[in-house]
Image (cartoon, rainbow, N blue to C red):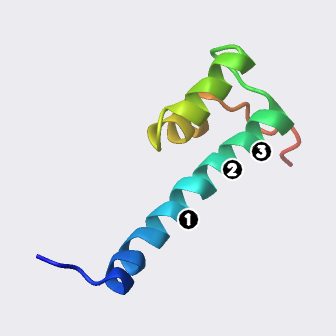
Amino acid sequence: MNIPLNDLLVMIIPLLLLHFGLIGFALYNWFKYGCKNLSKPIWLVIILLVNTAGPIAFILFGRKQNDNSN
């Protein structure tokens, strides 16, 4: 079963963009708004080292909500 390189890239690139987008969004929120439930260094390690689940966990459980909501 040989998959051509172009077809493989078409499948992998959207997943990589989603993965790095989640990491970027989580790091932005970590830096700008801080975090809750755990300390900042622990959340940083989770975001960076726990593949895709780390940023998702931070977004769901660790980030502080923006206090400037109207």
Q: Where residue 22 sits in the image (x, y, percent)?
A: 59, 51
Whether residue 39 sits left or right of residue 46 in the image: it is: right
Tell me the number on the disc at residue 17: 1
Kind of element beneath mark 1? helix
Which residue matches tag 2? 25
Q: Is residue 60 above or below residue 46?
A: below
| Residue sticking out furthest to the left | 1
Residue type at the position of mark 2: Phe
**Looking at the image, which residue is at 83% across and 45% down?**
69
Decide if residue 56 is on the left or right side of residue 31.
Answer: left
Seen from the viewer's position, the closer of residues 29 and 12 is: 12
Q: Which mark is residue 28?
A: 3
> Looking at the image, is 35 positioned above or below residue 11?
above
Q: Amino acid at mark 1?
A: Leu
- Identify the element where label 2 is drawn: helix
Whether tag 2 and tag 3 are in contact, CB under 8 A, the answer is yes
| Left or right of residue 44, residue 13 in this image | left
